[in-house]
Amino acid sequence: MTATDPRSVTGKFPPPAETFQLAVVGAGPAGLAAAIAAAEAGLRVLLIDENPVESAQMGLDVPLLYGGRATAATGRPARMLEQVIASDPGFAEAFDLGVDVRLGTACWGAFANGPNRQALPGLLLGLADAERSWLCGAQRLLLAPGARDLVLGFPGSDQPGVVGAQAVAALLGRYDAFAGRRAVVLGSGTLGIETALLLLERGIAVAAVIEARDVPQAPTDALDGRGVPVLCGMLPGEAIGGPDGVTALRLVATDGSPGPLLEADTVVLAVGTVPNVELAQVLGCALAFDALRGGWVPVLDADGATSLSMVFIAGDGAGLGDDAAAAGRRAALAAARSLGLAVAEAAPPRLPAPADAIAYRMDWMRGLIATGGAGTLVCQCEEVSRGDLLELRPPRYLDAPPPRPVASLGNGGPVHPDQVKRLTRAGMGPCQGRRCREQVAMLLALATDTPLETIPLASYRAPVRPLPLGLLADTEELAEMAAHWEVWFGIQGQWVPWRDIGTPREHLDRYGEPVDPGHL
């Protein structure tokens, strides 16, 4: 029998304060349907959702690109909670079935034992609300995180008024707190047309729908007679700004010729959405690139089971184009069966074949590069432009090596976004890459003339939501775990400056006393 290192945390991790048979993350169509189906099957279910999102998080464009177009009503937590509950009758059904529903609660991490981690007492979720952070246990986990907006930069896109279609839908439908009055919609696919119709239904004027390709990508019949032109072969040339952000959008044709100036206080990005895979990657679920499902998505079986036996995923977070509610119910029943419950299987619905989402967004990216130039910001948080990224320019406040072409990193293989992030800081800001992650990957693919699917997925790390350090600092720690933490600070080499490595000073301990070389 192998002895356990007394300084290891094995067996010392505190058990979670609460454990559920099934935890569902995300209370959209997939998550609500999953929680209801699991509760009907007899499981003890926890359903969490980060909505209502605090106004401070909205200001960071987390989790959606709110773009400074939320009203002051978002600063009233009680009203926001009422709006969320009223936005979907499924909440009342979940309450009646005994589902433990926790709104305004973010899942900042999910952790399971694996090849490099064996000390956990089971599957754990890192949860946080406005007052505390804690670890919750679950026998099974069903992720229904949905999707976020694809963000594409153009001159002036870093000012208030440039918002995502998902954020517009949330501000109008979930919160009733949208501040825009006249909008331009970028993208004529189903997302763009539906967003334009939603704006019109809520009394928001739509100046135009803009399309980079030569023809609309979805039927536009519903816009006929409503005074909304669909302008094809056009791109956003520059967002004109004022004290409150965008006041107009100047268009440019794909051939570079000047286009019209449209008065608007809001520019809605509706070119596409991106599956949220943060928690899946942090957990270690297998991911693969699928152009028909929106990019990087989890590898799933027909019931939503992942490469980890205790984790299931449903809805847009599993890939675009599925019937979210049906997928949620199917995954919940599969989770129940995996726990030994005798429940019937649900047949997957038949859906039309999806279009190539990646080819469409790459067409937009090529056009924006051709018309917007190298000075356009990619990472707003760290003020990294396209030119900075492609020449690997370090932040201006660092005394670092001179720029060099991004292709020099490849060594015959694809350039990894994580390496580019470390050199340029693109993606290191408080939005955690939500506004630049896909742009960076597309730029790297175009600059190195490689297919987008060969560019690795930039890594996610917990916490996947920005949290105050004060919340994380309260994590419970048993005395047995804390007893040997100082061992990490007794490693001799850790106290030697790199300039002194290989010199006599390396053989002194942190107190300046000689160290037996045999103990180094």
Image (spheres, rainbow, N blue to C red):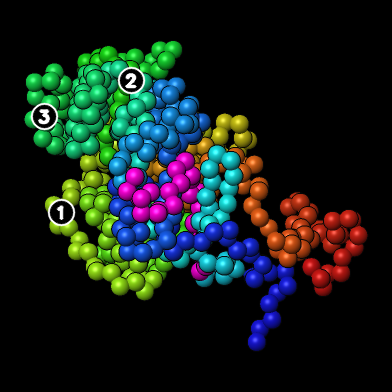
Marks 2 and 3 close (CB-CB < 8 Å): no
Q: Amino acid at mark 2?
A: Gly
Q: Which residue, as the protein is rendered here, is positioned at the far front?
A: 96
Query: What secondary structure is found at the residue carrying circle 2?
Result: loop
Q: Amino acid at mark 1?
A: Leu
Q: Nearer the viewer, residue 116 or 45?
A: 45
Which sits earlier in the primary sequence, circle 2 or circle 3? Answer: 2
Quadrant position of residue 369? top left
Residue matched to label 2: 180
The x and y percentages for residue 16 are 57, 60
Q: Nearer the viewer, residue 233 or 449?
A: 233
> In the image, what residue occupies the spot 40% across and 53% down?
99
The x and y percentages for residue 73 are 43, 24
Q: Determine crowd level at label 1: few under 14, some 14-19, many 20+ residues with C-alpha closer than 10 A.
A: few
Query: What secondary structure is found at the residue carrying circle 1?
Result: loop
Residue matched to label 1: 351
